Image (cartoon, grey):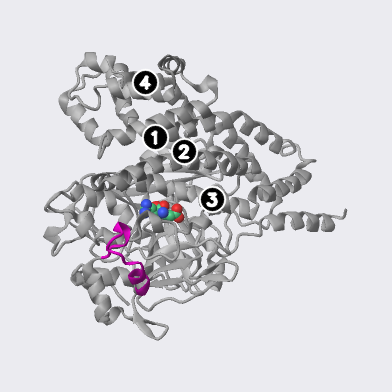
């Protein structure tokens, strides 16, 4: 073959598999956005690269924060007013609630700055700068020295993050503010409208937002909570556009996506879709069935287990969509074709000729251990008592600490929150049976295997453990009783397994060091070979830019899902009998009066209010709460979800179906103004 023909042949294979990253695919590093800016501008974006990111001048990045552990938030006023999702603020709102003040159910709105409620432990982090330190590290500088010299001053922290499987390293310097206060939240009947039923689903009608304010010391720096603190003055905050949106409009998302693996080989795709997801889905279905049944019989249990149910169900639904999507796209088969073409190219190359064989072998060796860890997480860690019992084991036996009544009370609060022993026993019976049935024998702790055998089976063993433990009923426990307790002993049997598990506790299978080292070379090879492809680093909770358009999609043959939902859709779902669809009376009254004031839009010739919209931005978990911006960099929504059928975008993005879901900023303002009676907050915003 001539080189020309060879190239065409390779492209024919490679280009079927992966067309070069188009507008919608990709999570780009803000400091390199100049490489994408022409593409963005072609799609309608009006600003310049340095408006998005600059580490010398104020830029849009200064209006974006990492909120709490794993969400994103954005400033919407010069006085530190911050938006994020309701589900991101959920635990803070819960912490501030009591029986007399149930802010989760009723919502909360501070009528003055004095009523803004400090959330103990809540922080937000602002990115000060990012820097490619690959060359500095190669020149022999030490990681800890780079970090130390970047973090002088109060509240600074930094980390060096690997990109492209360790081919590049970036320094991220953050400033963390630790006086963050709740300003307001809608009632759950708006903020969590649709609950788990609608989660990951379009059409969607959730007002998933909450409002906070960041406080600072007199120098605008981080400070512990103090009455004398003043609102933080961000270098930038987002102006808000109420002009509305239409299909095809440019959108951009600025936030902190957590975990994607776009470059993995077919082996990894097979593992995710054929092994890992089916196992996790099946086990969670069992747990959810047990919880749901108990909830259906008793209102108190329904409430106590609502958050636990939501947590278990969230990933459960996502994995189902991911497996379905990978099958539908034929991702593994396409990757095999791609790898075949790569191998032909690599055949004569000393460095790369056997690379894929090495990766294949590495996976073979690592997968059983990784699977054991995932199975342990879903079964043993799915028993609620386990982490409580392990806390006793670790602190009393391993660390030899004296477990005072206070310490035990604190652990009880943490691990046995909203606990129902009947649910936990039923789940534990089932999960231990599944664990023993699915785990390779050599991974099962010997004392456990013996105990189960002498008890006459997993369920009988669990029953006897629950019958004789004092852990759940007595407090404080003496050291003798802790030592003798069957649950503490059970937890102790897993100490070795847990230690081993930690060696496989990476973000995903491709990050386990024995595999990752090959990916480092593979990424280099791909860049030499697949020159047309636009590479972006996998998500790793660092700040990224994604861009796309406001757009619906064809959900099924002949069935198009349009991009915008409205108040009329909320009213169609409204049902006082169904907890997740029981909206506040005030919203019904407004709907009946049709007095929508400035929030009115027209749809099919009738007035209504916009609620949620779809767009084609490439997002992932961690992007919750991210600002959704228009072509002028104005805020038009808050990202909070994807459709479940598009969640395979963590491995392969399909522009025809992958959609992120945002709450329309006009709905946010409407709820503040008309449901919350907090219209005064709008005065400090810059609303266009
Ligand atoms: N699916 C969204 C995410 O992954 C929202 C989760 C919270 N909502 C819920 N109904 N569980 O975080
Ligand atoms: N709800 C997710 C989050 O909390 C975002 C949805 C997604 O995975 O795209 O980060």
Q: Name the outermost residue toward the front.
A: 297
Q: In which quarter of the image is residue 112?
A: bottom left
Residue 194's x, y, as percent?
35, 60
**Upstream in sequence: badge 4 or badge 1:** 1
In the picture provided, is 553 more to the left or to the right than 298? Answer: right
**Upstream in sequence: badge 1 or badge 2:** 2
Q: Mark 1 points at which residue?
A: 382
Q: Mark 3 points at which residue?
A: 322
Element marked by disc 1: helix
On residue 283, the disc is 2
Element marked by disc 2: helix
Mark 4–mark 1 distance (CA, rounded to whole Å): 14 Å
On residue 527, the disc is none
Q: Mark 4 points at which residue?
A: 490
Q: Name the outermost residue toward the right.
A: 1
Counting other residues with Cα less than 10 Å from the Cα at mark 2, is it few (<14), some (14-19), or many (20 or more)?
Answer: many
Which residues fall within the magenta stretch?
568-583
């Amino acid at each position: 073959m001539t080189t020309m023909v060879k190239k065409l042949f390779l492209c024919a294979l490679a280009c079927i598999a992966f067309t070069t990253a188009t507008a919608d695919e990709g999570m780009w590093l803000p400091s390199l956005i100049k490489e994408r800016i022409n593409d963005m501008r072609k799609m309608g974006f009006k600003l310049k690269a340095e408006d998005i990111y600059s580490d010398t001048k104020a830029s849009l990045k200064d209006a974006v924060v990492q909120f709490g552990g794993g969400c994103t938030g954005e400033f919407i006023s010069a006085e530190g007013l911050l938006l994020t999702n309701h589900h991101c603020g959920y635990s803070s709102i819960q912490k501030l609630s009591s029986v007399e003040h149930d802010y989760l159910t009723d919502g909360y709105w501070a009528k003055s700055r004095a009523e803004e409620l400090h959330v103990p432990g809540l922080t937000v982090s602002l990115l000060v700068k990012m820097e490619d330190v690959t060359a500095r590290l190669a020149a022999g500088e030490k990681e800890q020295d780079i970090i130390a010299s970047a973090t002088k001053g109060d509240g600074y922290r930094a980390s060096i993050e690997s990109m492209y499987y360790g081919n590049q390293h970036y320094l991220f310097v953050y400033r963390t503010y630790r006086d963050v206060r709740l300003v307001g939240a809608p009632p759950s009947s708006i903020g969590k409208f649709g609950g788990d039923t609608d989660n990951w689903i379009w059409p969607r009608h959730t007002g998933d937002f909450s409002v906070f304010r960041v406080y600072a010391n007199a120098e605008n720096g981080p400070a512990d909570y103090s009455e004398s603190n003043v609102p933080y003055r961000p270098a930038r905050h987002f102006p808000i556009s109420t002009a509305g949106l239409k299909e095809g409009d440019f959108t951009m998302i600025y936030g902190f996506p957590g975990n994607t693996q776009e470059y993995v080989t077919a082996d990894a795709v097979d593992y995710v879709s054929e092994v890992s997801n089916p196992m996790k889905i099946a086990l969670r279905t069992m747990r959810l069935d047990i919880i749901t049944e108990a909830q259906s019989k008793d209102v108190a249990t329904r409430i106590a287990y609502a958050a636990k149910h939501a947590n278990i169900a969230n990933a459960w639904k996502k994995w189902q969509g991911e497996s379905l999507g990978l099958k539908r796209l034929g991702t593994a088969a396409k990757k095999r074709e791609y790898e075949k073409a790569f191998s032909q190219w690599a055949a004569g190359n000393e460095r790369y000729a056997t690379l894929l064989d090495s990766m294949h072998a590495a996976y073979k060796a690592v997968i059983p251990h990784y699977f054991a860890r995932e199975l342990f997480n879903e079964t043993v860690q799915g028993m609620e008592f386990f982490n409580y019992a392990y806390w006793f084991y670790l602190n009393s036996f391993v660390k030899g600490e004296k477990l005072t009544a206070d310490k035990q009370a604190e652990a009880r609060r943490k691990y046995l929150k909203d606990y129902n022993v009947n649910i936990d026993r039923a789940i534990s019976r089932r999960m231990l049976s599944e664990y023993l049935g699915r785990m390779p024998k050599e991974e099962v702790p010997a004392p456990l295997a013996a105990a189960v055998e002498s008890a006459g089976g997993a369920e009988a063993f669990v029953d006897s453990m629950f019958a004789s433990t004092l852990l759940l009923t007595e407090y404080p426990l003496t050291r003798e009783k802790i030592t003798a307790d069957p649950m503490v002993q059970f937890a102790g049997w897993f100490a070795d397994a847990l230690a081993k598990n930690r060696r496989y506790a990476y973000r995903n299978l491709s990050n386990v060091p024995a595999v990752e080292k090959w990916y480092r070379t593979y990424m280099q090879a791909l860049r030499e070979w697949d020159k047309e492809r636009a590479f972006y680093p996998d998500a790793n909770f660092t700040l990224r830019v994604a861009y796309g358009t406001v757009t619906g999609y064809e959900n099924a043959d002949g069935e198009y899902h349009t991009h915008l939902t409205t108040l009329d859709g909320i009213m169609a779902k409204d049902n006082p009998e169904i907890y997740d669809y029981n909206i506040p009376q005030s919203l019904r009254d407004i709907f009946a009066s049709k007095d929508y004031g400035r929030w009115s839009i027209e749809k099919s010739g009738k007035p209504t209010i916009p609620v949620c919209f779809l767009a084609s931005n490439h997002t992932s978990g961690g992007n919750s709460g991210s600002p959704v911006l228009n072509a002028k960099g104005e805020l038009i929504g808050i990202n909070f979800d994807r459709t479940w059928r598009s969640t395979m975008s963590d491995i392969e993005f399909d522009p025809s179906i992958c959609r992120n879901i945002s709450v329309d900023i006009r709905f946010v303002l409407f709820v503040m103004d008309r449901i919350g009676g907090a219209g005064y907050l709008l005065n400090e915003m810059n609303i266009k």
